[in-house]
Amino acid sequence: MKTVQKGFTLIELMIVVAIIGILAAIAIPQYQDYVTRSRWATAVTETASLRTAIAECLQINGGNATVCTTNTQLGFTNALPTATGNGIAIAAPAGNGTGPLGATVEVELGTGGAGPGGCTVMMRGTVAETGVRWTYGHSGANCSQSRSGFAKGT
């Protein structure tokens, strides 16, 4: 009488474990980068009031970016927002140029590499004819576009 084999052989189980290991080795880093990018996207969204305040200040002052760097100048009665809900530090804006066009205001997020993925993201508002145009860039030793969601530099 012939016996019927039941279950899996050791080789079959090892092959399945190896396949799962390879998939995990690929998926986990990509998932971590995805989570980091989503945190940066949320942080940029949470700075909307700061961007609006800077744009309004620039409009009132004829594009003079050097006078749009303090709480009073930006119209904040409380302290300048220093952290988003993601715990990302925000440096005070730095103005460059007196306008009316081409002046810039820079705001650094994740100062000192404190941001997700060891990244620092720079928001740069440039005074244009129809408003303030915001561009974003990243810096940091281990920072990449896949981690921050932004291209290198600004």
Image (tube, helix red, strand yellow):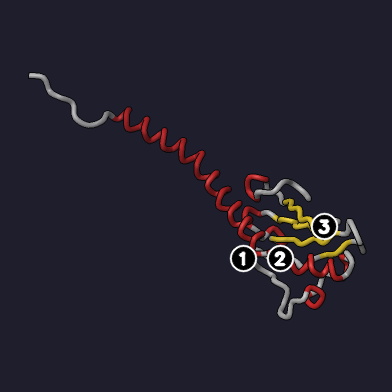
Q: Is mark 1 on a helix, strand or loop?
A: loop
The furthest residue to the bottom: 77
Q: Are marks 3 and 2 in contact (CB under 8 Å)?
A: no
Residue 145 picture location, percent across and down = 67, 45
**Left-right relation of 34 to 16:** right
Amino acid on which disc 1 is placed: Gly
The furthest residue to the top: 1
**Circle nearer the N terminus (3, 1):** 1
The residue sitting at 64% across, 66% down in the picture is: 84
Given this view, does label 3 or label 1 mark the residue nearer the observer? 3
Q: Do the residues labelled 3 and 1 touch (CB within 8 Å)?
A: no
The residue sitting at 76% across, 62% down in the picture is: 107
Q: What element carries label 3?
A: loop
**Left-right relation of 21 to 11:** right
Within 10 Å of disc 1 (Cα), the crowding (few <14, some 14-19, many 20+) is some
Within 10 Å of disc 3 (Cα), the crowding (few <14, some 14-19, many 20+) is few
Q: Mark 1 points at which residue?
A: 87
Given this view, does label 3 or label 2 mark the residue nearer the observer? 3
**Circle nearer the N terminus (3, 2):** 2
CA gap between label 3 and label 2 equals 26 Å
Within 10 Å of disc 2 (Cα), the crowding (few <14, some 14-19, many 20+) is many
CA gap between label 3 and label 1 equals 33 Å
Residue 97 picture location, percent across and down = 91, 61
Q: Which label is found at residue 90?
A: 2
Q: What element carries label 2?
A: loop
Among the 4 quarters of the image, the one containing residue 15: top left
Residue 38 picture location, percent across and down = 58, 54
